[in-house]
Amino acid sequence: MSLDKILSIGGRPGLFHLKTQTRSGFVAESLLDGKKITVGFRNNVSILSEIAIYTLDKEIPLREVFEKISTKESGGKTSVGHKEEKIKLEEYFFEVLPDYDEDRVYASDIKKIIQWYNLLHDHGIKDFSAEDETVSTEEE
Protein backbone atom coordinates (compact mmCIF):
# COMPACT_ATOMS: atom_id res chain seq x y z
CA MET A 1 0.00 0.00 0.00
CA SER A 2 1.55 3.29 -1.07
CA LEU A 3 0.93 6.81 0.21
CA ASP A 4 -0.95 7.49 -3.05
CA LYS A 5 -3.91 5.53 -1.65
CA ILE A 6 -3.81 6.92 1.91
CA LEU A 7 -6.08 9.88 2.65
CA SER A 8 -6.69 12.40 5.38
CA ILE A 9 -10.31 13.56 5.46
CA GLY A 10 -11.15 16.87 7.10
CA GLY A 11 -13.34 16.51 10.17
CA ARG A 12 -12.61 12.78 10.59
CA PRO A 13 -9.91 11.32 12.85
CA GLY A 14 -7.10 9.13 11.55
CA LEU A 15 -6.25 8.07 8.05
CA PHE A 16 -8.20 6.25 5.35
CA HIS A 17 -7.35 3.84 2.56
CA LEU A 18 -8.95 4.68 -0.79
CA LYS A 19 -10.97 1.65 -1.92
CA THR A 20 -12.93 2.70 -5.00
CA GLN A 21 -14.39 5.68 -6.80
CA THR A 22 -18.13 6.26 -7.15
CA ARG A 23 -20.19 8.74 -9.18
CA SER A 24 -20.60 11.07 -6.22
CA GLY A 25 -17.20 10.59 -4.55
CA PHE A 26 -15.39 7.51 -3.32
CA VAL A 27 -15.35 4.76 -0.70
CA ALA A 28 -12.60 4.78 1.92
CA GLU A 29 -11.73 2.41 4.76
CA SER A 30 -10.60 3.78 8.12
CA LEU A 31 -7.18 2.61 9.31
CA LEU A 32 -8.32 3.18 12.90
CA ASP A 33 -11.34 0.86 13.03
CA GLY A 34 -11.68 -0.69 9.55
CA LYS A 35 -15.10 0.87 8.87
CA LYS A 36 -15.90 1.84 5.30
CA ILE A 37 -17.36 5.27 4.60
CA THR A 38 -18.50 7.12 1.52
CA VAL A 39 -16.94 10.49 0.96
CA GLY A 40 -18.41 13.15 -1.30
CA PHE A 41 -16.48 15.58 -3.45
CA ARG A 42 -17.39 18.39 -1.06
CA ASN A 43 -15.25 16.96 1.74
CA ASN A 44 -11.76 18.33 2.29
CA VAL A 45 -9.53 15.39 1.34
CA SER A 46 -5.72 15.30 1.24
CA ILE A 47 -3.66 12.50 -0.28
CA LEU A 48 -0.57 11.87 1.86
CA SER A 49 1.71 11.65 -1.18
CA GLU A 50 0.74 15.24 -2.09
CA ILE A 51 1.45 16.80 1.33
CA ALA A 52 4.71 18.69 1.88
CA ILE A 53 6.36 20.24 4.93
CA TYR A 54 7.86 23.73 4.85
CA THR A 55 11.57 24.12 5.49
CA LEU A 56 13.56 27.33 5.46
CA ASP A 57 14.48 26.98 1.79
CA LYS A 58 12.00 24.55 0.17
CA GLU A 59 9.12 22.15 0.74
CA ILE A 60 9.90 18.51 1.58
CA PRO A 61 7.38 15.79 0.68
CA LEU A 62 5.76 14.10 3.67
CA ARG A 63 7.11 10.70 2.57
CA GLU A 64 10.68 12.03 3.01
CA VAL A 65 9.82 13.24 6.52
CA PHE A 66 8.42 9.76 7.26
CA GLU A 67 11.67 8.25 5.94
CA LYS A 68 13.69 10.49 8.25
CA ILE A 69 11.53 9.49 11.23
CA SER A 70 11.93 5.83 10.28
CA THR A 71 15.72 6.25 10.07
CA LYS A 72 15.83 8.06 13.43
CA GLU A 73 13.72 5.36 15.09
CA SER A 74 15.49 2.45 13.32
CA GLY A 75 12.24 1.42 11.66
CA GLY A 76 10.21 1.47 14.87
CA LYS A 77 7.47 3.70 16.22
CA THR A 78 8.26 7.20 17.41
CA SER A 79 9.77 7.65 20.86
CA VAL A 80 7.42 10.61 21.39
CA GLY A 81 3.64 10.28 21.41
CA HIS A 82 1.41 12.71 19.54
CA LYS A 83 -0.19 13.83 22.81
CA GLU A 84 3.06 15.13 24.32
CA GLU A 85 3.64 18.77 25.24
CA LYS A 86 4.31 21.28 22.48
CA ILE A 87 7.96 21.71 23.52
CA LYS A 88 8.68 17.96 23.37
CA LEU A 89 7.02 17.67 19.96
CA GLU A 90 9.03 20.58 18.57
CA GLU A 91 12.31 19.22 20.00
CA TYR A 92 11.61 15.80 18.47
CA PHE A 93 10.69 17.29 15.09
CA PHE A 94 13.81 19.48 15.16
CA GLU A 95 15.90 16.29 15.52
CA VAL A 96 14.10 14.77 12.53
CA LEU A 97 14.03 17.87 10.31
CA PRO A 98 16.43 20.52 11.68
CA ASP A 99 15.62 23.14 9.05
CA TYR A 100 11.81 23.04 9.27
CA ASP A 101 10.13 26.46 9.21
CA GLU A 102 8.98 27.04 12.79
CA ASP A 103 6.73 29.92 11.69
CA ARG A 104 4.77 27.83 9.18
CA VAL A 105 4.82 24.35 10.75
CA TYR A 106 2.66 24.37 13.87
CA ALA A 107 2.59 21.98 16.82
CA SER A 108 -0.75 20.65 15.52
CA ASP A 109 0.98 19.73 12.24
CA ILE A 110 3.75 17.91 14.13
CA LYS A 111 1.11 16.03 16.16
CA LYS A 112 -0.58 14.87 12.95
CA ILE A 113 2.70 13.78 11.37
CA ILE A 114 3.69 11.73 14.43
CA GLN A 115 0.19 10.25 14.76
CA TRP A 116 0.06 9.39 11.03
CA TYR A 117 3.53 7.82 11.08
CA ASN A 118 2.62 5.59 14.04
CA LEU A 119 -0.73 4.64 12.47
CA LEU A 120 0.95 3.69 9.19
CA HIS A 121 3.61 1.75 11.13
CA ASP A 122 0.88 -0.17 12.99
CA HIS A 123 -0.62 -1.18 9.63
CA GLY A 124 2.67 -2.44 8.24
CA ILE A 125 3.31 0.51 5.94
CA LYS A 126 6.99 1.11 6.55
CA ASP A 127 8.35 1.74 3.05
CA PHE A 128 7.88 5.41 2.24
CA SER A 129 10.04 5.54 -0.88
CA ALA A 130 8.42 6.90 -4.01
CA GLU A 131 7.24 3.98 -6.12
CA ASP A 132 6.80 5.82 -9.40
CA GLU A 133 10.12 7.63 -9.58
CA THR A 134 11.44 7.62 -13.09
CA VAL A 135 14.98 6.43 -13.61
CA SER A 136 16.92 8.53 -16.05
CA THR A 137 17.81 6.70 -19.22
CA GLU A 138 21.09 6.92 -21.05
CA GLU A 139 22.85 10.24 -21.17
CA GLU A 140 22.94 11.85 -24.57
Image: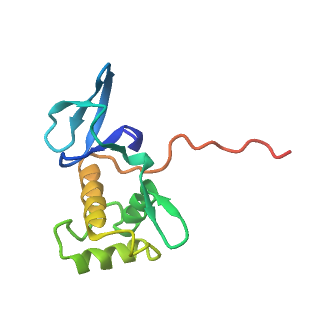
The image shows residue 129 at horizontal and vertical percentages of: 48, 50
Please name the residue shown 38% across and 47% down the image.
Answer: 48
As drawn, the residue found furthest toward the front would be: 42
User: How many marks are shown on the rendered structure?
Assistant: 0
As drawn, the residue found furthest toward the top would be: 23
Q: 96 and 85: which one is in front?
A: 85
In the shown orientation, is residue 32 left or right of residue 45? Answer: left
Can you say which quadrant of the picture contains the N terminus?
A: top left
Please name the residue shown 50% across and 62% down the image.
Answer: 59
Can you say which quadrant of the picture contains the C terminus?
A: top right
- Residue 52 vertical placement versus 7 (above, below): below
The image shows residue 122 at horizontal and vertical percentages of: 23, 50
Q: Quadrant of residue 94?
A: bottom left
- Residue 8 vertical placement versus 67 (above, below): above
In the shown orientation, is residue 4 left or right of residue 131? Answer: left
Q: 82 and 12: which one is in front?
A: 12
As drawn, the residue found furthest toward the right would be: 140
The image shows residue 61 at horizontal and vertical percentages of: 47, 56
Q: 88 and 118: which one is in front?
A: 88
The image shows residue 109 at horizontal and vertical percentages of: 30, 63
Q: What color scheme is it?
A: rainbow
In the shown orientation, is residue 107 left or right of residue 56? Answer: left
- Residue 24 vertical placement versus 112 (above, below): above
